[in-house]
Amino acid sequence: MAKENIVIIGGGVAGMEAAKQLLSLGYTPIIIEKSSKLGGHVASWHKLFPDMTPASEIIEKLKKDISGANVFTGTKVLSIVKDKDTYALTLDNGVAVVAKAVLFATGFSLFDASKKEEYGYGVYDRVITNKDLEAWFNGNKDARIPENPKAVGFVHCVGSRDLKAGNSQCSKVCCTTAIKQAIEVKEKFPQAEIYCFYMDLRLFGKKYEDFYINAQMDYGVHFIRGRVSEVGETIDGRLQVKAEDTLSGKPLKVHLDSLVLMSGMVCNQSVMPLAKSAKLEIDNDGFLRSKDNIYDILSSNQPGVFYAGACTGTKTVPETLAEARAAAVEIHNYLING
């Protein structure tokens, strides 16, 4: 007997891992991805912390594992309409799909760093974001990293834990990403001084604390506890960064060749019209709201609609993959048991 359609909205690591597990359960999942390629944010990353695993290895492995799935890239879901116990999805390529189970794996967006005007993103050429730097690591040299920089700085919590920016939540991954990127920059430019400006370090994951210690001991990265208050450009084109070292209680002025802003995770606003179409609830942080934040985080308020990954809040890659595996089992149980 043919098994039910399962539609996965989003072809990042959450969507692909869920599809992999559903294939192993005998289903043929349908992945709908709005961009032209699979992989989501992870596909644009260079290496993943804490083991410095090349991101491309993870993406290529997942692509091989879902070779039996039906995949639509460059395709958007225009609407979802519920009819009794099924959902009718209309795609922008003219295709209509009917399914009893739908998985939202729509991920997150990065905070627009230009909204923090004091940091100068979009004003000074040498102020870039974590995303820009990853693109530079991957060979895109438009990120405005000068040759042989003497000093590079990183600003944590840009758009995270910031009421003025409209996001009071911690993005969870920014601290460790900054450490990873600082190490990569130091490996490329051993002579450069590297500075990390942070409020406090949230290193909760396996090996994260060791990662931080190695950055200090083995790579000489300077960690400065204090918010950056002002960024300006000097007459020779370098950046002047003013901050307060809250541990010493003294103001600090540093001249840098590049400043990297660690843009935090925010809700994916592009999915909101679709969520409204499916009558899904939105949490007070802007992300999709789980049925229960402890016991039932993979279910929505609508029967047959499930979640995996950062569509419900900030997640690391291992957390995202684990949720995707669990969501596949939840969907299977739902279709078997009703």
Image (cartoon, helix red, strand yellow):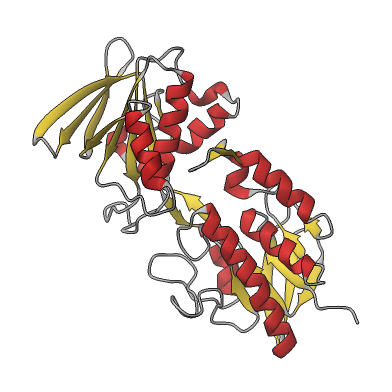
Q: Does 157 sit left or right of 69 as displayed?
A: left
Residue for point 67% across, 75% down:
329
Q: Quadrant of residue 9?
A: bottom right
Q: How many marks?
A: 0
The answer to whether residue 84 shows anywhere in this view is no
The furthest residue to the left: 249
Residue in the picture at 43% in, 30% down: 183
Q: Which of the 4 image quarters holds residue 294?
A: bottom left
Q: Position of residue 283 (x, y in %)?
A: 42, 71
Considering every residue shown, the one lying at the far top of the view is 236
Vertical arrangement, residue 53 with respect to residue 329, above or below: above
Image quadrant for the N terminus? bottom right
Q: Is residue 93 left or right of residue 78?
A: right
Question: At x 56% / y 22%, what residue is drawn?
Answer: 141
- Quadrant location of residue 25? bottom right
Of the 4 image quadrants, the one containing the C terminus is: bottom right
Residue drawn at x 54%, y 76% is 280
Residue 65, percent across and down? Answer: 77, 54
The spot of residue 119 in percent (x, y) is 30, 34
Residue 47 in sight = yes
Residue 95, image x, y percentages: 82, 64
Q: Closer to the camera, 208 or 86?
A: 208
